[in-house]
Image (cartoon, rainbow, N blue to C red):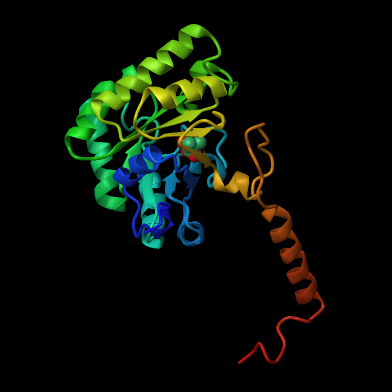
């Protein structure tokens, strides 16, 4: 049997840990709808994140704060219907878990029950420890998210690289170790120095997935609309564009408009 995860029928949190163990990097992308999720899953991506970045790329909001629990469940259930292989993780939206641990548990259960997803992700360390413990106690797998945590953008005031000073870097390492100890199955690190990412990935045995956190982590995640070049306004250093779908779509639409105006579409053969 191959030691590469492409033979896996359904990716699980346990398999992600095994992939870290054997040094196989984990691929993760965001998905918010049925059609795109089907393409990404068929291409073999290991993990699909129904990110609250849906607030930005799907709904056009400036931040991730406005998206609601109902909207996240709608996106997640659309993705679940499309996917055969990838592990599906859903972001808990802002306001659905910070209040208290009972509310956090209720929100996590709604996501799992109503969408059929496999796990949830939430942002923060010590501040949300009680909520994470409560969610884990119900048997819901939890992924942590440290570094740049976009739901706290108004506290940071900027999307600049996080944890560049020793105090914040030390807290991040402590939080990562705590998240592993309480039972999180994995961790996302966003926009931190590469060396700090390396320190964290070596300090914990759960998989650490990075976005703008350097090459030394156990896997990488990007927002699909960014890496496919559908959205073009967002150009951070960490983003590699693998396609220019904006141009492909716009050329196709111009061609269609030309054909309609020229009475070239539809032909008799394309009619009933
Ligand atoms: O919502 C999202 O897309 C995310 C990724 C940036 C990790 O949380």
Q: Report whether 142 appears left or right of 257.
A: left
Q: Is residue 212 left or right of residue 189?
A: right
- Camera-side residue of 205 and 141: 205
Residue 59 at x, y = what percent? Answer: 53, 45
Question: Is residue 20 at all visible to an observer of this figure?
Answer: yes
Q: In the displayed image of the protein, which residue is found farthest to the front?
A: 1
Q: Residue at x 58, y 24 (%)?
A: 159
Residue 148: % across, % down: 50, 24
Residue at 43% x, 11% y is 170
What's the residue at 31%, 30% (across, down)?
A: 97
Quarter occupied by the C terminus: bottom right
Nearest to the observer: residue 223 or residue 202: 202
| Left or right: 157 in relation to 95 | right
Look at the picture and state if 266 lies above or below 245. below
The residue located at (55%, 40%) in the rendering is 56
Position of residue 231 relative to residue 42, above or below, is above
């Amino acid at each position: 049997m191959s030691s590469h995860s492409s033979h896996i029928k359904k990716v699980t949190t346990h398999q992600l840990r095994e992939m870290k163990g054997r040094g196989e990097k984990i691929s993760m992308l965001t998905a918010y709808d049925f059609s795109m999720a089907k393409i990404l899953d068929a291409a073999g991506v290991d993990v699909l994140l129904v990110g609250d970045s849906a607030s930005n790329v799907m709904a056009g909001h400036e931040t991730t704060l406005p998206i609601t629990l109902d909207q996240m469940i709608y996106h997640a259930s659309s993705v679940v219907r499309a996917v055969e292989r990838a592990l599906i993780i859903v972001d808990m939206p802002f306001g659905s878990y910070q209040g208290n641990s009972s509310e956090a548990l209720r929100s996590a259960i709604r996501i799992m029950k109503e969408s059929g997803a496999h796990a949830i992700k939430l942002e923060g360390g010590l501040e949300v420890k009680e909520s994470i413990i409560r969610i884990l106690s119900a048997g819901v797998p939890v992924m942590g998210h440290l570094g740049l945590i976009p739901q706290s953008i108004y506290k940071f005031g900027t999307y600049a690289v996080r944890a560049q000073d020793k105090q914040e870097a030390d807290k991040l390492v402590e939080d990562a170790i705590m998240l592993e100890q309480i039972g999180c199955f994995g961790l996302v690190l966003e926009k931190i120095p590469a060396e700090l990412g390396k320190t964290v990935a070596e300090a914990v045995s759960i998989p650490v997935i990075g976005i703008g956190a350097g090459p030394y982590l156990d896997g990488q995640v990007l927002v699909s609309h960014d890496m496919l070049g559908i959205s073009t306004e967002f150009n951070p250093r960490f983003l590699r564009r693998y396609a220019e779908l904006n141009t492909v779509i716009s050329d196709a639409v111009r061609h269609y408009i030309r054909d309609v105006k020229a009475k070239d579409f539809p032909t008799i053969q394309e009619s009933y």
